Each structure stands twice: as C-alpha cells, then as structure tokens.
Amino acid sequence: MQNNNLTVTVPQEHLDSEVLERSPVSSLRAEAIARIRNSLRPGQQQMADWQSGPLAISAVPGAGKSTGMAAAAAIAIARQYEGFAQSGSSSRRQLVVVTFTRSAAANIKAKIRKYLREDLSLPQTGFFVYTLHGLALNIASRHPDLSGLQLEYATLITPTQSHRFIRTAVEQWIANNPERYLGLLEGHQFDGEETERLRRQSVLRTEVLPELANTVIHEAKSSGISQELLQQWSQQTTDRYAILSVAAGLYEQYQNLMRSRDFIDYDDMILAALRVLENDSARRIEQNQVFAVFEDEAQDSSPLQTRLLEILASNEGDGKMGRWGDGERISPYHSTPSPQPSPTPDSALNLVRVGDPNQAINSTFTPADPIYFRQFCEECDRIQRLATMDRAGRSTRIIIEAANFALKWVNNQWSATNPQSPFPHTDNRQVPFRLQTILPVDASDPQTNANPAPVGLGLELYAPRDIFHTVELLSQRAIELFGKDPTKNSAAILVRENRQGRWLAEALAPVCKEHNITLYDVGERDRRSHVPQEILALLQFCDRPHSPDYLKAALEALVQRQLIPTQDLNALASLPEEFLYPSPLAAPQAEPVQKAAHLCRSLLRARLELPLYQLISFLALTLNYDQAELATADKLAERVNQQIASNSSMRSMLSALSEIVSSERFEPVETEDSEERYTRRGQLTIITMHKAKGLDWDYVFIPFLHENLIPGRFWVPPQSQFLGDFTLSEVARAQIRAALHGESTIPDVTQAWELAKQLKTSEEYRLLYVAMTRAKVLLWMSAAHKAPFTWSKPENLQEQAPCPVFGALKRQFPQCVVTSAMIAK
C-alpha cells in the first residue's frame, strides 16, 4: 500500500466479453447488462461486476455512489432471476439494500426500479430497500416470540438528554447512590456554602448526569455492551468519580424504566433482530430469503448494525454464521469486544458495503465511528476485495483541488501535533481522513457537464472586517449570480450551527426581497418539530412553578427563542420563589433577571386567567412563533383538546403532551416533504453543514469560518467546572471507544479527555470537507476578522482567529483570495 492508503485491488481486466462469459444470463439480457456496465465509471463498474463474497467500496464525494449501487443491484437481481429460471426453482431469494435515511432509501429504490424496467425489461421486484432500523424492525416483528418485541404494546421513543426517562433514571440513581452523588456534589473542592450547593445540585441533576446517561446509553447499547461489562471496565479505571460505574448505574436504571413501561428505542430494534438471528431455525429462515446485502453510507454504521448485516449476508449452507464464514457466534450483549478474524477469498459473506469514511460526521453525537468501515476496507484489501471510487464529476477542478489540499493538510497537521497519541494505531486508522484523492472524470465520462467550468474564480476566499461586512459581500455576490438567470442555478449558505442561520436569514431577508431572490431557512422548518416540547416545558412550569427543574426547562425554551437574555439559569432555578417573587429585603435583580422573571410571571397569570383550551395558542404567541410554527401549534392544540375532551384538566393535558413528546408521534405542519425543496433553482438556501450532506448546489457560500467553531475548542461549561477540567460524558465516551477499538488498557481521565478532543477535531474537519464538496461551480468561503464568541449574543463582536484550514487555503491558492480592490472593480 502507498501512503497508508488502501489501494484499488479489484482486478481491472473485466472486458465485456468476460462479463458475458461469467454471467449465467441470456444473450439479450447479457447485452443489456453490458450496456449498463459500460455507462458506469471504473469504480462503479467494479461494483457492477460483483457476483459473490465480501466487497468494500470506498468512494469520494460526488463519485456517484447511489447510481453505482442502483446499477449493481439491478444487475445482481437480473443474474438472480436468470439463475432461478435455469434451475427451475420456485423460491427466489431477494437482494436487501440498506441505506441511512428514508429519503435515501426512496431515491435508490426508484433508481433500481428504473434500471429493471427500462434497461433490463424485468419486473420491478426481487429486492427490498430499508433503512437499518427498518430492516431490524422487519426481522423482529416476524418473530415476536424470539425478539421479545411486541409492537402492539411497545412505544418507540428517541431518548435525549431532556427526555423524562433519562431524567427519571438520574433521580433514581441519586436516590440509590447517595454517597457517590455526594462525591460528585463536592467536586474537586467545596466550601459548603448553601447557595453553591443548590446550584451544583441543579447542574448535576439537569445537565451533567442526564448528559452522561444519554451519551453512555447510546454508546453502550449500539455496541452490545451490557451494564455488567461497563462495571467491569470501571474497575480498570482509578478516577475519583468512578465515571464508568456511575454511567453503568444510570444505564441500568434507564433499562429498568424502559422495560417497566414497554418502551423501546432504536437500539432496541437492532438488539431484537439480533436475538432472532441467534436462533438457528429463525436465522436459517431469514438468510434463505436473502442472496446478498448491499449497504450504502457504511461509514455511519454502529458495531451492532454491522453485525446484523453480516449475519444476514452470511451463507447458511455451511452451517456457519461468523463474520467471515468462520463459525464465530456472538451474543448481542457480548462480554468482550468482538475479535476480527482474517477473511478468505471464498468467504460465505455476500456483503457489499459502500461508504466514504471522510464523510463520517456523526460520530461525536451518535455511536457511529468511521474506524469500523475503515477496518472492513482493510480486511477486504487483504483478499483483493477493495475498490475505490475516486472519480467525481460534481465539482469544477479548482474546488476538487481545494478539497484534496484540505484533506492532506489536516492529516499532516494531525500527524505533526499527535506524534504520540495516547493509544496510537499501527494502521493509522485514527487520523482524521483516509488518504484518498478526488480525481476528475475522464473526457469520455457519460455524465453531462461533468467537472463543469468554474464561475468566477471557482474558489473565492474573503476576509471581511466583521460579520456585517460578511453579509454585505455575500449578498453582493448572490445578487450578481442570481441576476444573470435566477431560475437556472441553485445556491446555498452552509453554516455550522442554526443560530448563525437564523441571524443570516434576518440580515439577508431585505436584500433578497428587494432583488426577488427566494430565501429558504431550513432551520426554521426544523425548529417547528420542537413546538410540542417547548409548549410542554412552559405548561409544566405553569403547573408547578416552584419546581427548579420545570423552571429551568421553561427558561431554556425562552432563551432558545431569544425572548430573554442568556444568563446563568441554574442560579435562577435553584431558588424559584426568590427569583419569581423577590421579597422587599432581597438584593435588587439585574436587568436580564428582571426581564426573565417578568415573562415567567406573565405565564403564571395567563394560567389563572385563560381557559385551558386556549393555553397552547397563547403560549405559541408568547414564544413568537412564525406562521408555520403557529400552524403546528394549532394542530397540536386541536389534537390535545380532542384527547382530553372527556377529562379536561391540566393533569390530563400534561399527560397527553408528554405522550406526544416522548413517543415522537407528532409531525410538524409541512407544505412538502421532498429534499428537493433544499436545492430548488432560483433559491438561496440556508442550511447547516450536517444537513447538507448528500446534497449539492451550483454555488455554495461558507461564511464564519473561525477557529472557535471549526475545529472548535473543547471546553468545559463554567457551571460544571467544579467537577474538573473535563466533562464526564466525553470522558466516558472516549473510554468506551478505546475499549471497543481493542486497546489493551482503558485510558485514565486525562488521556480520555485528550482522545475526546482528537475525535472532536477530526470530525469538525471532516464536516468542513463535506461542506466544501457540496459546491459545483463556485465555492465562496470567508472568515471575518471580528465575530461573536458565541452566536447566542451575535452583537458582541471580538477578534476571532480564522479556521486553520482557511488560512492554509489562502496560502495555497493566493490567486483565489479576493481583496477589496478586486471587489471595487
């Protein structure tokens, strides 16, 4: 291998005649397959040539993963049809295609059907397309006795840090572990002052412990790690708080609550399916229905999800269900990290996995980790079953050069600054990027307008004075671009966080209106899905205003809506009576506190003066909802009022709302559902970098590229610094991943915190790489000299250092730096 890169080792000498000779299909269908294959790029052709065994495809952005997978799937289905026709068998196995989101599943399903219908003249059957959780649920529901999943009684939830099950688990753990909780309360130093004790209690109960529980539950369940194993791992650590032991206790309380209420989460679906596949008879039934599994976006799979696909894709004919046909058996809750046996070329695993580890951007808030797909690629590389789709026609050449440079620069910097990582890997899997270069397509490529000509400089780098100058330059460039033909091209502004998008939308609205440019803020739509949760938070406060938890939740909603200034909410919530109704002898409240208290008192007054059925509408107006949010609130009010018609009381209303929030059943009011609304021509879309993955636009603007956001500073919130210079949740995450990655020892707190920093830095740089590769003909990037330290207070400007990659790009591409003199011309 070269430069630690995984080389393309699938043989390239597949001539059309060889494909026809190897494929047991009729001559007419073979010709159709050859035509499909010839319309593909080399990397896509290697996928289309698959006949059996494991295959890994590592693809660069814009390489046409979904198109290649759809073509390969259609060809595999055609061969399967012909094979059954020749054998005279009445039973036909299916191809299972798995992808990450429902929209991606719908997209690839349509492409496969088109190939079957128009190119191969076959029925549009012989395959299923699922999301990973949809596949697991399908298997589990067919065998309820084995899975333990009774769907008619179970309720699906998506637990978050604020979820009531997480909060209840925290309270139960505190009650059962008073001494350990006291140790957390004292932190690294404590003078015993009562006000500080109350503040720390609020921080622990509403922030630190719920965050630790939420993180560890996701990490452990998705990896098949039991509470008992976490307790065993905790004995290998010596930190004063016994973080993994605390986490195991929280995990145990959460699981007990879930079982007692017949609630399940998404990880339970995977575990239920694995319980089914542990049964020899059920596993044989499921495997006999499948001839192969194709997985898209494989870099986003967790260990258990990968395990599920590998078992399903195994050939049961040899009586084995191991990862590579070796007979290995692993319980869904294994007691040790699973071994990685060496594969063989004749492996019984009919699994094709396609992904890009360089677009893994979810690993710091989901259990997904690109190390697992990299490992699969290495295993396939050893048996010459690895292909690289490295040719991409999406972007113009200067944008490709910039993305390639950013990738190599980040890896070089990482190696220079981490020469002795606490737990270095000999295979270098923990570097931020896999060293694969995006190449332009060949001149004969079938894609129309592949690697298009640049608009302007293609790559334009700006250094505005401040964020207001940024808006001025950005709007000026947008007017120029849309002025030529507004309906011809698409454009997007990619931001790191929604608060930037909200501020930009307000700043750009007058300009866009004046020049008839459609402005679409995706964050506004996303925020509508939080309407039930915000309404519930305010109603719970109105019902029990003296509860510190409910008061803090209400204040958080008001801060999020920018109705009150950002401030120390723990200090306000620790003494509700003093905050809401200060006595004449109390110290005067600061102006931000007065504003918050006044708004809270107005909510309590409305609770007394308004009829129950009007409360939700009143709260929606108080929260300053826009038109779509108000429509969502009206829909919510109608639903709740119907539900409590026979028992109209605050308690029944809160119960109905809690059920809606916890069960994830309520959908916001939408005018359309397709992701096409993000990429409409003639529209300037404001969208986060995370949500932009999988999409592309002609023009992409990336403003506010500052070091404090990308790669960001791994900081400890001031309110929890009494515990030390680290956060419990990130330390636990790093310790769990080190164990899962096969490290010989579990890192101590200091080492785990450093590992967590490295994980965060790597992912932020991959996120920037994803953002850059969304652009087709123009990539506009800027880093203002002055910007807010936090976007919750955008008016407080200070000098901000640019993102290191932005500075490196300016040095590497000086011809792309746009100066004031160039703008004036």
Image (tube, helix red, strand yellow):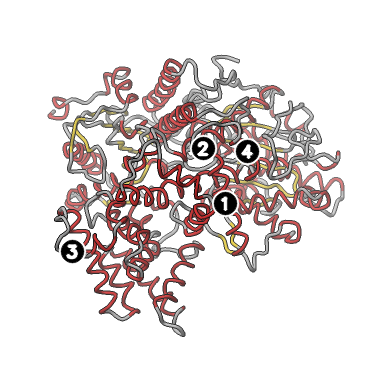
Q: Which residue is mark 4?
A: 36
Camera-side mark, 3 or 2: 3
Q: Looking at numbered disc 1 in the image, what kind of residue is underneath it?
A: Ala
Which quarter shows the N terminus?
Answer: top right
Q: Quadrant of residue 426?
A: top right
Q: Which residue is mark 1?
A: 110
Element under disc 3: loop
Q: Looking at numbered disc 3 in the image, what kind of residue is underneath it?
A: Ser
Depth check: 515 or 93 in front?
Answer: 93
Residue 67 point in image, percent of width and height: 56, 40
Q: Which residue is depicted at the point 66% across and 35% down?
A: 48
Residue 656 point in image, percent of width and height: 46, 72
Residue 522 point in image, percent of width and height: 35, 51
10 Å neighbourhood of mark 3: few (<14), some, or many (≥20)?
A: few
| Residue furthest to the bottom | 646
Q: Which residue is mark 2?
A: 733
Q: Which residue is mark 3?
A: 583
The mark that comes first in sequence, 3 or 4, is 4
- Gap in Å between the C-alphas at discs 2 and 1? 39 Å
Q: Quadrant of residue 553?
A: bottom left
The mark that comes first in sequence, 4 or 2, is 4
Q: Is residue 250 left or right of residue 332?
A: left
Q: Is residue 443 visible?
A: no
The mark that comes first in sequence, 1 or 4, is 4
- Gap in Å between the C-alphas at discs 1 and 4? 16 Å
- Gap in Å between the C-alphas at discs 4 and 2? 45 Å
